[in-house]
Image (tube, rainbow, N blue to C red):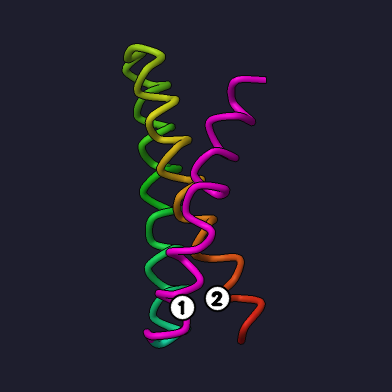
Amino acid sequence: GLVGLAQVIPVVALALPAGQLIDRWDRRWVIQAALAIFVLCSLGLAAVSIWQLPIAWIYGLLVLNGAARAFHQPAKSAL
């Protein structure tokens, strides 16, 4: 449950700022940046798993992943 919450809170919190940013900036650039953050989060989660870092790192990366999703979904829909 906490994993889903960590990913949803940024989406809800950033919905309005993400919409405004997507209307002002090039949507393709926003999608590319969000995808780059997705990749970095995935690599970070793999590193946390390999090095057995504290669980706070996992939740931090999931929040960052949720923030990227907040920008990716509307930009993708607008394109």
**From which residue to which does the magenta span run?**
1-25
What x and y, as percent, mark residue 73?
61, 65
Residue 16 higher or lower than 11, as above or below = below
Q: Is 51 in the magenta?
A: no
Q: Nearer the viewer, mark 2 or mark 1?
A: 1
| Picture quadrant of residue 47 | top left
The amino acid on which the numbered mark 2 sits, given as a three-letter code, is Ala
**Splitting the image into 4 quarters, where does residue 53 fall?**
top left
Q: Locate the C terminus by quadrant.
A: bottom right
Q: Residue at x 60, y 40 (%)?
A: 8
Q: Picture coordinates of residue 11 (x, y %)?
A: 55, 49
Q: Which residue is mark 1?
A: 22
Q: Quarter of the image for the N terminus: give it.
A: top right
Residues at badges 2 and 1 in contact (C-beta under 8 Å)?
Answer: yes
| Residue that lies at the very extreme toward the front in this rendered image | 16
Residue 48 numbered mark, or none: none
- Mark 2 / mark 1, whichever is N-terminal: 1
In the displayed structure, 55 sits above or below 47; it is above
Mark 2 Cα-neighbour bin, 10 Å: few <14, some 14–19, many ≥20? many
**Image quarter for residue 64?**
top left
Q: Which mark is residue 75?
A: 2
